[in-house]
Image (spheres, helix red, strand yellow):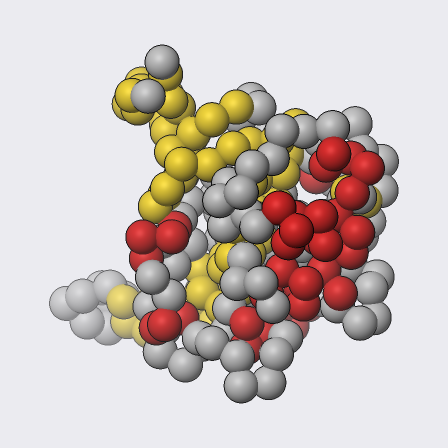
Amino acid sequence: MKINLDKIYDISMPIYHGMPVYNGKEEKRPVLEVQSDFNTSKAYESRIHMNLHTGTHMDRTLHMIPGGNTMETLDIRDMITKCTVLDLTSVQEKITEADLEKKQIREGDFVLFKTRNSFEDILETSFIFLEKSGAAYLAEKKVKGVGIDALGVERSQPGHETHLQLMQKGIHILEGLNLKEVEEGEYFLSAAPLNIIGAEAAPIKAYLIALEG
């Protein structure tokens, strides 16, 4: 397969104060603060105050597992890879094992889920998520990674079963993707996170390049 540089898709969420954040919590909204401007200095500089789980980001296992791994232990080659976008826009509430069985998912795949989240204003309230049976199915399939166009890979699961089933099998998790313009199919993914030492998550500038042949 060859990459088609004429078809590059930015699948990252823009960062701004009024952007969608998890459960609409005000304390999670990013704030851009100007530290110096041309009225006070010869240089313009600013600081951003932002939860690391804002917008498009990657989770590490410390997010859910005491003593889990952090960003500096990541093998960056895992995040620059072929991937498969799966169209699950017909799913109404949650992605289950039954939904995933309809797709051709192979061992070692990095799968990205395109859902109604990319089209409807539901990210802060009732976004489509990966339910625990779907996570168990992916763990059984031994996929490399999972990405979703939601602010979390799961919601309304008090035991965080989806996160844990993926993390315990070393499956990478990407959240906050924007897949509205992307069709189902094979792509080359670049999703390199910031290398923040000791952090349980980090922002990502993610994009896809179409594959041909």
Q: Residue at x 38, y 52 (%)?
A: 78
Q: Residue at x 52, y 63 (%)?
A: 170
Comparing 205 with 28, the one in front is 205
Residue found at the very far left of the displayed protein? 42
Is 141 positioned to the left or the right of 206 in the image?
right
Q: Residue furthest bottom?
A: 67
Residue 137 position within the rendered picture, expressed as x and y whole percent measured from the top left:
71, 48
Work out whether 213 lies above or below 50. Answer: above
Quarter that holds the C terminus = top left
Left or right for 52, reference 141 = left
Quarter of the image where one finds residue 206: top left
Q: Along the line of sight, which residue is nearer the eye, 7 or 65?
A: 65
The spot of residue 150 in percent (x, y) is 66, 48
Can residue 110 be seen in the rendering of this structure? no
Q: Is residue 78 above or below residue 149?
A: below
Q: Is residue 39 left or right of residue 7?
A: left
Which residue is farthest top?
213
Left or right relative to 133: residue 182:
left
Q: Which residue is found at the position 68% from the left and 63% from the top?
A: 165
Q: Position of residue 81 (x, y in %)?
A: 37, 42
In this rendering, the count of numbered labels is: 0
Counting from the top left corner in percent of width and height, residue 200 is at: 50, 74
- Residue 11 visible: yes
Quadrant, the N terminus:
top left
